[in-house]
Image (spheres, rainbow, N blue to C red):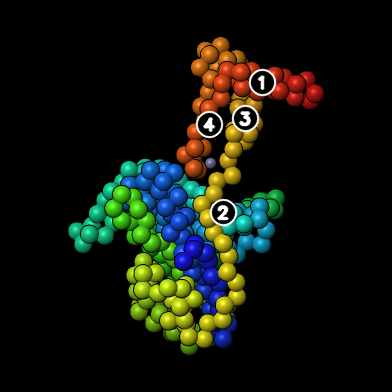
Amino acid sequence: MRDEIVIAQALNGTVRIHIALTKELVQQAVDHHRLQPTSAAALGRTLTVTAIMASDLKNDDEKITAILNGNGPAGTVLAQGFGNGDVRGFIGNPDIHLVRPDGHLDVGAAVGHDGDLQVIKDLGLKEPFTGVSHLQTGEIGIDFAYYYAISEQTPTIVNVGVLVGTDRNIETAGGMIVQLLPGAPEETIEFCEKVSTEMGAMTELLRQYDELEDIVLAYFPDAEFLDTRGVRWHCPCSREHFMVSLGTLAEADLLEMINDGEGAEVRCDYCNTYYRYSTEDLKAILEAKRVRDRRS
Ligand SMILES: [Zn+2]
Protein backbone atom coordinates (compact mmCIF):
# COMPACT_ATOMS: atom_id res chain seq x y z
CA MET A 1 0.00 0.00 0.00
CA ARG A 2 1.30 3.46 -0.92
CA ASP A 3 0.69 6.60 1.15
CA GLU A 4 -2.66 8.11 0.24
CA ILE A 5 -5.80 9.65 1.67
CA VAL A 6 -9.22 8.19 0.90
CA ILE A 7 -12.32 10.34 1.40
CA ALA A 8 -15.75 8.76 1.86
CA GLN A 9 -19.22 9.43 3.17
CA ALA A 10 -21.54 7.03 4.94
CA LEU A 11 -24.80 6.62 6.87
CA ASN A 12 -26.78 8.14 4.00
CA GLY A 13 -24.37 11.03 3.64
CA THR A 14 -24.55 12.17 7.26
CA VAL A 15 -20.89 11.46 8.08
CA ARG A 16 -17.70 12.25 6.24
CA ILE A 17 -14.67 10.00 6.61
CA HIS A 18 -11.01 10.62 5.82
CA ILE A 19 -8.52 7.79 6.16
CA ALA A 20 -4.80 8.13 5.50
CA LEU A 21 -1.76 5.93 5.23
CA THR A 22 1.30 8.10 5.98
CA LYS A 23 4.04 5.53 6.59
CA GLU A 24 6.49 6.87 4.01
CA LEU A 25 5.69 10.49 4.87
CA VAL A 26 6.49 9.91 8.56
CA GLN A 27 9.59 7.90 7.67
CA GLN A 28 10.84 10.87 5.65
CA ALA A 29 10.23 13.17 8.61
CA VAL A 30 12.17 10.79 10.86
CA ASP A 31 15.06 10.58 8.40
CA HIS A 32 15.26 14.33 7.77
CA HIS A 33 15.11 15.32 11.45
CA ARG A 34 16.80 12.20 12.89
CA LEU A 35 13.93 11.69 15.30
CA GLN A 36 13.98 9.44 18.35
CA PRO A 37 10.84 7.27 18.75
CA THR A 38 8.60 9.49 20.92
CA SER A 39 9.49 12.60 18.93
CA ALA A 40 8.74 10.56 15.78
CA ALA A 41 5.30 9.55 17.08
CA ALA A 42 4.43 13.11 18.16
CA LEU A 43 5.46 14.72 14.88
CA GLY A 44 4.13 11.78 12.81
CA ARG A 45 0.65 12.01 14.36
CA THR A 46 0.58 15.77 13.83
CA LEU A 47 1.76 15.46 10.21
CA THR A 48 -0.92 12.83 9.57
CA VAL A 49 -3.86 14.84 10.90
CA THR A 50 -2.58 17.97 9.15
CA ALA A 51 -2.28 16.04 5.87
CA ILE A 52 -5.91 14.94 6.25
CA MET A 53 -7.03 18.51 6.95
CA ALA A 54 -5.14 19.73 3.88
CA SER A 55 -6.77 17.08 1.68
CA ASP A 56 -9.93 19.22 1.72
CA LEU A 57 -8.15 22.28 0.28
CA LYS A 58 -9.25 23.29 -3.20
CA ASN A 59 -6.06 24.83 -4.63
CA ASP A 60 -2.45 23.68 -4.66
CA ASP A 61 -1.06 26.82 -3.01
CA GLU A 62 -3.53 26.85 -0.11
CA LYS A 63 -2.07 25.60 3.14
CA ILE A 64 -2.88 24.53 6.67
CA THR A 65 -0.47 24.88 9.57
CA ALA A 66 -1.02 23.13 12.89
CA ILE A 67 1.09 24.23 15.86
CA LEU A 68 1.01 22.42 19.20
CA ASN A 69 2.76 23.69 22.26
CA GLY A 70 2.00 21.93 25.51
CA ASN A 71 5.09 23.07 27.42
CA GLY A 72 6.42 19.51 27.51
CA PRO A 73 10.02 18.47 26.73
CA ALA A 74 9.15 18.00 23.02
CA GLY A 75 8.75 21.76 22.60
CA THR A 76 6.72 23.08 19.68
CA VAL A 77 5.34 20.59 17.17
CA LEU A 78 4.49 22.13 13.82
CA ALA A 79 3.07 20.55 10.66
CA GLN A 80 2.14 22.21 7.41
CA GLY A 81 0.07 20.67 4.63
CA PHE A 82 -0.48 22.10 1.13
CA GLY A 83 -3.41 21.65 -1.24
CA ASN A 84 -1.24 19.56 -3.58
CA GLY A 85 -0.66 16.89 -0.90
CA ASP A 86 2.81 18.05 0.15
CA VAL A 87 3.44 18.00 3.91
CA ARG A 88 6.38 19.15 6.03
CA GLY A 89 7.04 19.93 9.67
CA PHE A 90 9.30 19.83 12.70
CA ILE A 91 9.45 19.20 16.43
CA GLY A 92 11.39 21.39 18.88
CA ASN A 93 13.21 18.46 20.47
CA PRO A 94 13.94 15.55 18.10
CA ASP A 95 15.60 13.42 20.81
CA ILE A 96 12.67 12.36 23.04
CA HIS A 97 12.36 8.68 23.88
CA LEU A 98 9.75 8.45 26.66
CA VAL A 99 8.02 5.11 27.20
CA ARG A 100 5.03 4.36 29.44
CA PRO A 101 5.12 1.39 31.84
CA ASP A 102 2.93 -0.57 29.34
CA GLY A 103 5.59 -0.17 26.67
CA HIS A 104 3.77 2.43 24.53
CA LEU A 105 5.50 5.65 23.58
CA ASP A 106 4.43 8.42 25.94
CA VAL A 107 3.51 11.15 23.47
CA GLY A 108 1.32 12.92 26.04
CA ALA A 109 4.22 13.38 28.46
CA ALA A 110 6.52 14.49 25.63
CA VAL A 111 4.17 17.14 24.25
CA GLY A 112 2.53 18.13 27.55
CA HIS A 113 -0.93 19.70 27.73
CA ASP A 114 -0.28 23.07 29.34
CA GLY A 115 -0.88 25.05 26.18
CA ASP A 116 -2.73 25.29 22.90
CA LEU A 117 -3.29 23.75 19.51
CA GLN A 118 -3.46 26.44 16.88
CA VAL A 119 -4.64 25.78 13.33
CA ILE A 120 -4.00 28.38 10.63
CA LYS A 121 -5.83 27.95 7.31
CA ASP A 122 -4.34 30.07 4.55
CA LEU A 123 -6.81 29.97 1.68
CA GLY A 124 -5.16 32.75 -0.33
CA LEU A 125 -7.48 35.39 1.13
CA LYS A 126 -6.25 38.60 2.73
CA GLU A 127 -6.42 37.15 6.24
CA PRO A 128 -5.85 33.50 7.12
CA PHE A 129 -8.40 31.77 9.35
CA THR A 130 -6.97 30.90 12.78
CA GLY A 131 -8.59 28.57 15.30
CA VAL A 132 -7.24 27.81 18.77
CA SER A 133 -8.16 25.26 21.40
CA HIS A 134 -6.58 24.20 24.66
CA LEU A 135 -4.63 20.95 24.60
CA GLN A 136 -6.40 18.12 26.45
CA THR A 137 -3.77 15.39 26.82
CA GLY A 138 -0.92 16.11 24.40
CA GLU A 139 -1.66 12.73 22.79
CA ILE A 140 -2.61 14.69 19.63
CA GLY A 141 -5.62 12.64 18.40
CA ILE A 142 -7.80 13.75 21.32
CA ASP A 143 -6.43 17.28 21.02
CA PHE A 144 -7.48 17.56 17.38
CA ALA A 145 -10.92 16.05 18.17
CA TYR A 146 -11.36 18.74 20.83
CA TYR A 147 -10.19 21.39 18.36
CA TYR A 148 -12.82 20.32 15.83
CA ALA A 149 -15.54 20.37 18.49
CA ILE A 150 -14.59 23.76 19.97
CA SER A 151 -13.23 25.73 17.06
CA GLU A 152 -15.19 24.31 14.12
CA GLN A 153 -18.28 23.08 15.99
CA THR A 154 -17.94 19.69 14.28
CA PRO A 155 -18.23 16.53 16.39
CA THR A 156 -15.26 14.44 15.23
CA ILE A 157 -13.56 11.12 15.94
CA VAL A 158 -9.80 11.28 15.43
CA ASN A 159 -7.91 7.98 15.41
CA VAL A 160 -4.23 8.48 14.61
CA GLY A 161 -1.16 6.38 15.24
CA VAL A 162 2.50 5.83 14.43
CA LEU A 163 4.28 2.55 15.10
CA VAL A 164 8.03 3.01 15.44
CA GLY A 165 10.20 -0.08 15.07
CA THR A 166 13.87 -0.52 15.77
CA ASP A 167 16.48 1.65 14.01
CA ARG A 168 13.98 4.50 13.68
CA ASN A 169 12.03 2.45 11.18
CA ILE A 170 8.39 3.44 10.80
CA GLU A 171 6.45 0.17 10.69
CA THR A 172 3.18 1.88 9.99
CA ALA A 173 1.48 5.25 10.35
CA GLY A 174 -1.90 6.65 9.54
CA GLY A 175 -5.10 8.23 10.70
CA MET A 176 -8.85 8.18 10.37
CA ILE A 177 -11.15 11.13 10.96
CA VAL A 178 -14.93 10.72 11.12
CA GLN A 179 -17.06 13.87 11.18
CA LEU A 180 -20.76 14.38 11.68
CA LEU A 181 -22.22 16.63 9.02
CA PRO A 182 -24.55 19.46 10.11
CA GLY A 183 -28.03 18.20 10.92
CA ALA A 184 -26.94 14.57 11.39
CA PRO A 185 -29.83 12.65 13.00
CA GLU A 186 -29.72 11.01 16.43
CA GLU A 187 -29.17 7.54 14.89
CA THR A 188 -25.97 8.79 13.22
CA ILE A 189 -24.71 10.26 16.48
CA GLU A 190 -25.37 7.00 18.34
CA PHE A 191 -23.81 4.92 15.56
CA CYS A 192 -20.65 7.05 15.65
CA GLU A 193 -20.42 6.89 19.44
CA LYS A 194 -20.47 3.10 19.14
CA VAL A 195 -17.82 3.15 16.40
CA SER A 196 -15.69 5.44 18.55
CA THR A 197 -15.67 3.00 21.49
CA GLU A 198 -15.26 -0.14 19.36
CA MET A 199 -12.64 1.05 16.88
CA GLY A 200 -9.19 -0.51 17.33
CA ALA A 201 -5.97 1.49 17.49
CA MET A 202 -5.06 2.94 14.08
CA THR A 203 -1.76 1.10 13.82
CA GLU A 204 -3.57 -2.21 14.56
CA LEU A 205 -6.16 -1.50 11.85
CA LEU A 206 -3.43 -0.73 9.33
CA ARG A 207 -1.71 -4.03 10.10
CA GLN A 208 -4.98 -5.97 9.99
CA TYR A 209 -6.34 -4.72 6.65
CA ASP A 210 -4.75 -4.57 3.21
CA GLU A 211 -6.67 -1.57 1.90
CA LEU A 212 -7.79 1.70 3.50
CA GLU A 213 -11.25 1.18 1.97
CA ASP A 214 -11.59 -2.11 3.88
CA ILE A 215 -11.05 -0.36 7.23
CA VAL A 216 -13.77 2.16 6.39
CA LEU A 217 -16.16 -0.62 5.28
CA ALA A 218 -15.50 -2.60 8.48
CA TYR A 219 -17.14 0.20 10.50
CA PHE A 220 -19.35 1.85 7.87
CA PRO A 221 -20.68 -0.91 5.57
CA ASP A 222 -22.67 1.56 3.41
CA ALA A 223 -19.64 3.83 2.78
CA GLU A 224 -19.46 5.53 -0.57
CA PHE A 225 -15.96 6.48 -1.73
CA LEU A 226 -15.63 10.01 -3.07
CA ASP A 227 -11.95 10.65 -3.74
CA THR A 228 -8.39 9.38 -3.33
CA ARG A 229 -5.58 11.89 -2.94
CA GLY A 230 -1.82 11.57 -2.93
CA VAL A 231 0.19 12.70 0.07
CA ARG A 232 3.95 12.94 0.54
CA TRP A 233 6.70 14.54 2.57
CA HIS A 234 8.02 17.44 0.57
CA CYS A 235 9.53 20.78 1.55
CA PRO A 236 9.48 23.43 -1.16
CA CYS A 237 12.63 25.12 0.17
CA SER A 238 15.60 25.57 -2.17
CA ARG A 239 19.00 27.17 -2.47
CA GLU A 240 17.41 30.04 -4.39
CA HIS A 241 14.76 30.52 -1.68
CA PHE A 242 17.38 31.14 1.02
CA MET A 243 19.45 33.32 -1.31
CA VAL A 244 16.44 35.63 -1.40
CA SER A 245 16.32 35.53 2.42
CA LEU A 246 20.03 36.39 2.68
CA GLY A 247 19.37 39.31 0.32
CA THR A 248 17.01 40.80 2.90
CA LEU A 249 19.80 41.11 5.49
CA ALA A 250 21.25 44.54 6.18
CA GLU A 251 24.16 45.49 3.92
CA ALA A 252 26.47 45.80 6.97
CA ASP A 253 25.69 42.21 7.99
CA LEU A 254 26.36 40.88 4.50
CA LEU A 255 29.63 42.84 4.35
CA GLU A 256 30.69 41.38 7.68
CA MET A 257 30.01 37.85 6.40
CA ILE A 258 31.94 38.56 3.21
CA ASN A 259 34.91 40.00 5.15
CA ASP A 260 35.18 37.06 7.53
CA GLY A 261 35.63 34.84 4.46
CA GLU A 262 33.82 31.83 5.91
CA GLY A 263 30.74 31.96 3.73
CA ALA A 264 27.33 31.31 5.25
CA GLU A 265 25.23 28.32 6.16
CA VAL A 266 21.45 28.40 6.37
CA ARG A 267 19.27 25.64 7.75
CA CYS A 268 15.63 25.08 6.79
CA ASP A 269 13.63 24.58 10.01
CA TYR A 270 10.96 22.56 8.23
CA CYS A 271 13.13 19.86 6.67
CA ASN A 272 16.52 20.29 8.37
CA THR A 273 18.33 20.75 5.06
CA TYR A 274 21.51 22.85 5.16
CA TYR A 275 22.44 25.21 2.36
CA ARG A 276 25.97 26.58 2.13
CA TYR A 277 26.94 29.84 0.42
CA SER A 278 30.51 30.76 -0.45
CA THR A 279 31.99 34.23 -0.05
CA GLU A 280 31.57 34.60 -3.84
CA ASP A 281 27.86 33.73 -3.48
CA LEU A 282 27.53 36.36 -0.75
CA LYS A 283 29.23 38.98 -2.93
CA ALA A 284 26.74 38.20 -5.72
CA ILE A 285 23.83 38.45 -3.25
CA LEU A 286 25.13 41.84 -2.01
CA GLU A 287 25.59 43.12 -5.57
CA ALA A 288 22.04 42.07 -6.52
CA LYS A 289 20.76 43.80 -3.38
CA ARG A 290 22.57 47.04 -4.31
CA VAL A 291 21.09 46.92 -7.83
CA ARG A 292 17.61 46.40 -6.36
CA ASP A 293 18.08 49.25 -3.83
CA ARG A 294 19.23 51.66 -6.60
CA ARG A 295 16.11 50.83 -8.63
CA SER A 296 13.66 51.39 -5.80
ZN1 LIG B 1 13.03 22.80 3.72
Instruction: Please identify the residue farthest to the bottom as the structure is shown.
Output: 187
Q: Are marks 2 and 4 in contact (CB under 8 Å)?
A: no
Determine which of the numbered discs, if any, sits on residue 86 in the image.
Answer: 2
Judging depth in this view, the residue of 153 and 245 nearest the camera is 245
Q: Residue at x 52, y 64 (%)?
A: 4
Judging depth in this view, the residue of 272 and 120 nearest the camera is 272
Residue under circle 4?
A: 275
Q: Residue 147, how many percent across, how many down?
A: 48, 62
Q: Residue at x 40, y 48 (%)?
A: 30
Mark 1 vs mark 2, CA separation in Å:
32 Å
- The disc labelled 4 sits on which kind of residue? Tyr
Mark 3 vs mark 2, CA separation in Å:
23 Å
Determine which of the numbered discs, if any, sits on residue 284 in the image.
Answer: 1
Of labels 1 and 2, earlier in sequence is 2
Instruction: Please identify the residue farthest to the top as the structure is shown.
Output: 259
Residue under circle 3?
A: 243
- Indicate the secondary structure of the residue bearing disc 3: helix
Q: Residue 207, how many percent across, how many down?
A: 36, 69
**Quadrant of the rendering where the C terminus is positioned:** top right
Q: Are marks 1 and 2 in contact (CB under 8 Å)?
A: no
- The disc labelled 2 sits on which kind of residue? Asp
- Indicate the secondary structure of the residue bearing disc 4: strand
Mark 2 vs mark 4, CA separation in Å:
21 Å
Answer few, some or many: residues within 10 Å of disc 3's Cα (few below 14, many 20 plus, some between 14 and 19): some
Answer few, some or many: residues within 10 Å of disc 1's Cα (few below 14, many 20 plus, some between 14 and 19): some
Question: Is 177 placed above or below 273 here?
Answer: below
Which image quadrant is residue 184 in?
A: bottom right
Mark 3 vs mark 4, CA separation in Å:
9 Å
- The disc labelled 3 sits on which kind of residue? Met
Q: Are marks 4 and 1 in contact (CB under 8 Å)?
A: no
Which image quadrant is residue 104 in?
A: bottom left
